[in-house]
Amino acid sequence: MNPAARRHFPRIILLILLLIGGILRCRSIDREGQSPDEFWSVYLSTGRAQTIFSLPPGKLLDPPPPATLRSAPSWPHVWTGMINAIHPPLYHVILRWWMDLFGDSDAVTRAMSGLFSLAGAVVLYDALRRAGEPTAGLIAAAMMIFAVGQIDMSQQTRSYTMLAFCGVVACHAVIRIETCGAYLCTLRELSLAWIAALLTHYLAVPALGGLGLYALIRLRGRDRNRTVAAMLISSLVALALWYPWLRRQYPLFTSDYTWLHEPTPGIHQAMLRVLYIPAAQLYGRPALLATIAPAVIVYLLPLLWIKRKPQMLIWWFWTAGVIFSLTLRDLASHTLLSAFPKYTFAASPAICALASIPSPLPGWRRWILPGAMLFSVVVATVQRWQQGPPPQADWRGLSRQIDQWAAPRDPLIFAPDPFWGSPAFSYIALMHYVPDSQRPILMLARPADASVLRQLSGFNRIWLIRPMAAPQIDWLPGWIVLKSTARPDAAFVLEMVPAISQSSSPPANRSPAP
């Protein structure tokens, strides 16, 4: 192979891997409807702030308030409207630009996550190449492209792939500084990635802390001083840009999230979750025995090979910043943060990099372990291809069924959700899939009182949307159920008529009296 071909061969392989990765992420990308978390991401990107969540309960709204991208405020309102979410704004601003260009369908909004995932694989390859490991870079990029956790998160409208991408870019910048020096171009890359990560998700804070610790240990002299200064200044810039709204979000940080509480807290369970994380990111939901090898490779081998591969420790520090900080939080607060792959997803590229480290064995045998890891990831991906994406709550089917059954003037009544709280989540889901609905709506905070019943008295039929977890109480006294249906993990839909009519086929609704 001539020198020119040898130089371009890794890029050709990487391009082929990216094409395969694009196919893996596009296949069945919209087979499952969106989850409430995804509806929440799309809604925040409309810039409507907490409008939907400030609707007065118990009041019939006709026409219903808008909740979609159609006629949404301009994108600066996304930044200023994040006061009711525990998220920084950058991902939602970029998602808004994306939706303005391509629309807000499930496939379109999820495609942006897939692009961040694939772009992260490219940056990961170049980072390892610059660290003197081009072959390991190809293996790590392939692992990231094929990792089931990456594919699953690439098919969700969430900020986690963007966070992972910003993290890889920040690590790439530090490697450039370590190999080439702290010049303006490398410090600019580091600063932009650092600010973007902090404005994408709050989980970036401990991960960037691990990266800063690596810079303090590995860099020397002027390079270390400039790099640490860039990190501190970038942190202050991000804080200055976001502080007015961060201060308004602060009460949400102290809320009691009971769904995160561990039933039987203990250090044993927390350590088992830590062992499970690398395999969960690579294989999806592996069997217990499949968790041992990835955990040993990611957590222990980099420390044993530190003298041979000191630059690879950057990925270990990034992983430690993500995983061990969550574990300490779990132990201190008796929570289950580390049990959710999305919260540890920022470590996914670093896990792929650590799993690609060649062993100290001579010759081709040094690649046996990374090759075996890549092969196991590909096998898991083939199984995932056969099974398709994980099932989601069927809000899409539920919304379209309501639109098919309900008459244009049938009121839709939304009961509160004991998990999400506000019934507005159900309304956002409905409007996402039936954006042209002009049916009157009414949000319930408690069973209907006399005032609510009076507002509904002019209708012959209504539809109650009750989440699956909502208590089975009489939300609408004086109304009886004609028909009931349910969608898995989403909600019950109850067709109801006044008890006095006793009619199984009520006439079309008339508008209520003014």
Image (tube, helix red, strand yellow):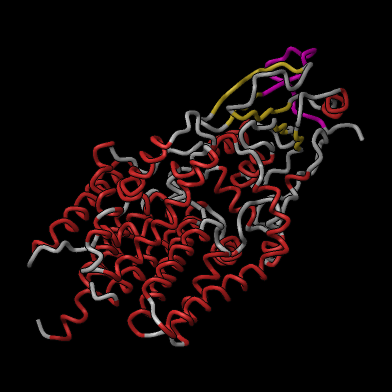
Looking at the picture, tell me which residue is in the foreground, 208 or 409. Answer: 208
Residue 498 versus residue 75 in the image, above or below: above
Looking at the picture, tell me which residue is in the foreground, 496 or 305. Answer: 305
Q: Residue at x 67, y 24 (%)?
A: 495
Answer with the quarter of the image where residue 213 lies: bottom left
Residue 10 image point, x, y percent: 22, 74
Is residue 152 visible in the rendered image? The answer is yes
Quarter of the figure with the N terminus:
bottom left
Is residue 71 visible in the rendered image? The answer is no
Left or right: 35 with respect to 58? left
Query: Residue 81 magenta-drawn?
Result: no
Residue 230 versus residue 141 in the image, above or below: below
Left or right: 437 with respect to 318? right
Residue 427 versus residue 169 in the image, above or below: above
Left or right: 424 with respect to 135? right
Residue 241 image point, x, y percent: 66, 70
Residue 254 versus residue 309 in the image, above or below: above
Q: Residue at x 60, y 49 (%)?
A: 40
Q: Total number of numbered labels?
A: 0
Question: Which residue range is magenta in the image?
Answer: 495-510
Q: Residue at x 84, y 23 (%)?
A: 449
Q: Residue furthest right?
A: 514
Answer with the quarter of the image where residue 111 lies: bottom left
Looking at the picture, tell me which residue is in the foreground, 507 or 184. Answer: 184
Residue 207 image point, x, y percent: 46, 60
Q: Main secondary structure of the magenta part?
A: loop
Residue 191 image point, x, y percent: 51, 76
